Image (spheres, rainbow, N blue to C red):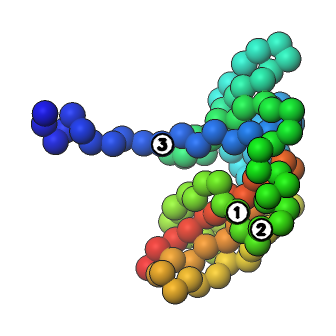
């Protein structure tokens, strides 16, 4: 088997949400993502993207992590590396996104901030160095 055959290419997180169209609209309006597709009638699956990042959304009656996320300080379900964490933070603030953690310089070398979606899913945005 060649090294190329075993190379991992990308990952697509799937967030569990109660209302796929509402969640997709949240990502569009608060985080600047595009709605790629909504599937089903009514939609129970969809995708949003921004630049090279894609997130899928799947309808569930009660998000699996909602209760746990409410108790945890930062139960992060996805981390997205960005070029300028401070500029993105300002953009999200201006759009009215729910900020779960302001930009913080971490001991592990990155600076990150967290946003929370209406279902309690927390996404981290980080710049390294």
**Which residue is disc 1 drawn over?**
75
Examine the rendered structure and indicate whether residue 101 appears above or below residue 105: above
Q: CA distance from mark 1 to mark 3?
A: 19 Å
Q: Which mark is residue 72?
A: 2
**What residue do we see at 69% from left, 42% from top?**
15
Q: Are dots 2 and 1 in contact, CB under 8 Å?
A: yes
- Image quadrant containing the C terminus: bottom left
Report the mark closest to the observer, 1 or 3.
1
The percent position of residue 54, horizontal first and vertical second, equals 57, 40
Q: Which mark is residue 33?
A: none
Relative side of 126 to 25, left or right: left
Q: CA distance from mark 2 to mark 1?
A: 6 Å
What residue is at 56 percent from the left and 68 percent from the top? 126
Q: Residue at x 27, y 42 (%)?
A: 7
Label 3 environment density (alpha carbons within 10 Å; few <14, some 14–19, many ≥20) = few
**Label 2 environment density (alpha carbons within 10 Å; few <14, some 14–19, many ≥20):** few
Is 65 positioned to the left or the right of 124 in the image?
right
- Is residue 26 positioned above or below 88 on the image? above
Which disc number belongs to residue 11?
A: 3
Earlier along the polypeptide chain: callout 3 or callout 2? 3
Q: Is residue 21 above or below residue 92?
A: above
Residue 37 percent across, percent down from the top left = 68, 25
User: Which corner quadrant holds the N terminus?
Assistant: top left
Specify which label sits upstream in the sequence, 1 or 3.
3
């Amino acid at each position: 088997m060649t090294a190329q055959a075993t190379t991992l290419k990308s990952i697509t997180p799937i967030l569990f949400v109660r209302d796929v169209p509402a969640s997709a609209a949240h990502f569009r309006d608060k985080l600047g993502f595009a709605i790629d597709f909504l599937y089903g009638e009514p939609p129970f699956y969809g995708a949003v993207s921004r630049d090279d990042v894609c997130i899928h959304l799947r309808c569930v009656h009660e998000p699996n992590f909602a209760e746990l996320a409410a108790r945890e300080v930062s139960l992060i379900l996805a981390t997205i590396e960005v070029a300028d964490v401070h500029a993105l933070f300002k953009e999200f603030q201006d759009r009215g996104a729910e900020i779960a953690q302001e930009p913080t310089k971490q001991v592990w070398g990155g600076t990150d901030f967290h946003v929370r979606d209406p279902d309690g899913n927390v996404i981290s945005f980080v710049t390294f160095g």
